Image: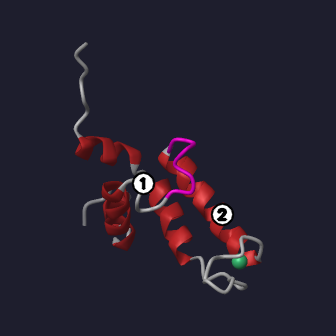
């Protein structure tokens, strides 16, 4: 059966909303775990870890990711990740609908 594929570029553009960018920025701004174990893994229980998960949840739902993409990371979708990084470096000019 023939299937129509949406070009990846267009799929990315529709998925990455201003909300997703904001959520991604907030997620990246979360600090380091307060109580990592000896190998440097996050404890998953401190305030910072809680913030990290909350922020990750926001990104996850803003992007409409699948349940198994959990937690979302660069490995799941390098192209999407790169796009998010690029767009989150933007000052926001491109997303308010105005042309300066
Ligand atoms: Zn922690």
| 59 up-or-down from 88: above or below | above
Magenta stretch, overall SS: loop
Mark sitting on residue 97: none
Tell me where the magenta segment starts and ends, as one range: 65-72
Q: Residues within 10 Å of mark 1 (few under 14, many from 20)?
A: few
Is residue 33 found left or right of 17 in the rendered image?
right
* Callout 1: SS: loop
- Vertical arrangement, residue 26 with respect to residue 97, above or below: below
**Residue corresponding to mark 1:** 76
**Left/right of residue 4 with respect to residue 77 in the rendered view:** left
Q: Are marks 2 and 1 in contact (CB under 8 Å)?
A: no
Residue sitting at 25 percent across and 67 percent down?
100
The reply, left or right, for residue 15 in relation to residue 48 is: left
> Residue 13: x and y, percent?
31, 47
- Give the image quarter of residue 52: bottom right
Which residue is at the front of the view, 13 or 46? 46
Residue 48 placement: quadrant:
bottom right
Q: Residue at x 41, y 62 (%)?
A: 74
Q: As rendered, which of 53 and 88 lies closer to the eye?
A: 53
Badge 1 residue CB within 8 Å of ligand 1: no
In the rendered structure, find residue 53 and report the number of the disc placed on it.
2
Looking at the image, tell me whether mark 2 or mark 1 is earlier in sequence order. 2
Q: In the drawing, does residue 40 fall left or right of residue 49?
A: left
Please name the residue shown 72% across and 70% down the image. 44
Residue occupying image coordinates x 24% and y 29%:
5
Tell me the colour scheme of the image. Answer: secondary structure
- Is 55 rendered above or below residue 65? below
């Amino acid at each position: 059966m023939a299937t129509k594929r949406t070009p990846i570029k267009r799929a990315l553009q529709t998925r990455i909303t201003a909300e997703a960018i904001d959520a991604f920025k907030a997620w990246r701004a979360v600090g380091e775990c307060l109580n990592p174990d000896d190998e440097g893994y996050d404890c998953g229980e401190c305030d910072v870890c809680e913030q990290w998960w909350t922020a990750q949840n926001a990104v996850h739902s803003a992007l409409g990711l699948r349940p198994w993409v959990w937690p979302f990371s660069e490995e799941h979708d390098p192209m999407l990740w790169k796009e998010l990084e690029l767009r989150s470096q933007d000052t926001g000019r491109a997303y308010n609908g105005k042309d300066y």
